[in-house]
Image (cartoon, rainbow, N blue to C red):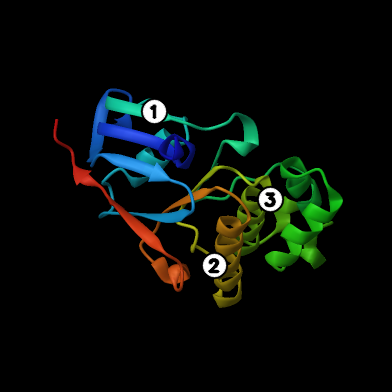
Amino acid sequence: MIETETTLIRARDLSVGYSSSAAAAVPDLDLSSGMVWHVTGPNGTGKTALLKTLAGLLRPIAGCLERHLGKGSSGATYVHSSPYLFSGSVRRNLSLACPSRPQVESAAAAFGLSSLLDRDAAKLSHGEQRRVALARAIACRPSLLLVDEPEGGLDDEALAAWRTCMIRALEEGPTAIVVATHRPVAFEGIPVREIRMLPNRT
């Protein structure tokens, strides 16, 4: 059926959090591909916990969560608010996501990283590290891309690159992008649906 092909995650009466403590509840959700989803809510309402739960990194505290995703990098990719990079060069970090050299160079060019490919990733600025993390995630071409506060450390040029890459990812394949951010400046011109976090009901 079409619905099962496009619905990547179905959640009912979902509570998310850490250990056995629920941080927040989520309205019933049918998360479909071909769309950017904006997670909203005040600080401390469980936005990060929701992203990690949708990515399969945390178990739901309560409720039902069905994930219709593949395995590996083509399934779900989560980008933390503090960029996590592997040791070695920028090129190595991108190559771990896409071993094809043309793909690496394309991802680097999209985020203005071409001149930094042979630079030690640990010596980059925070903004540069953020660009590497986003470029690596986009290069994976996941079915579900979950990004926590992507705007941190990005200048206007990098924000424009992030917007372009989101649009391209939606155009090139059946993917969904879920973004938790207080500054949705990169959403201009992109169809967006909202996921609003609800206060802890337990």
Residue toward you, 99 or 8: 8
Nearer the camera: disc 3 or disc 1: 1
Who's the residue at 39% across and 61% down the image?
192
| Observer able to see residue 157 | yes
* Tag 3: amino acid: Ala
Alpha-carbon span between mark 3 and mark 1 = 26 Å
The residue at which mark 2 appears reads as 163
Q: Residue 66: which disc? A: 1
| Observer able to see residue 61 | no
Of label 3 and label 1, which has the lower sequence position?
1
Is 140 situated left or right of 100 in this image? left
Question: What secondary structure is marked by label 3?
Answer: helix
Who's the residue at 75% across and 66% down the image?
109
Q: How many numbered badges does the structure rendering display?
A: 3
Residue 111 location in percent, x, y?
A: 67, 65
Task: Name the quadrant of the N terminus.
Answer: top left
Who's the residue at 74% across and 49% down the image?
94
Residue toward you, 32 or 72: 32
Who's the residue at 36% across and 38% down the image?
49
Of label 2 and label 1, which has the lower sequence position?
1
Is 29 situated left or right of 146 in this image? left
Q: Is residue 182 above or below residue 57?
A: below
Q: Residue furthest front?
A: 1
Question: What secondary structure is marked by label 1?
Answer: strand
Residue 26 location in percent, x, y?
A: 25, 40
Nearer the camera: disc 2 or disc 1: 1
The residue at which mark 3 appears reads as 139
Which class describes the residues within 10 Å of circle 2: few (<14), some (14-19), or many (20+)?
some
Which class describes the residues within 10 Å of circle 1: few (<14), some (14-19), or many (20+)?
few
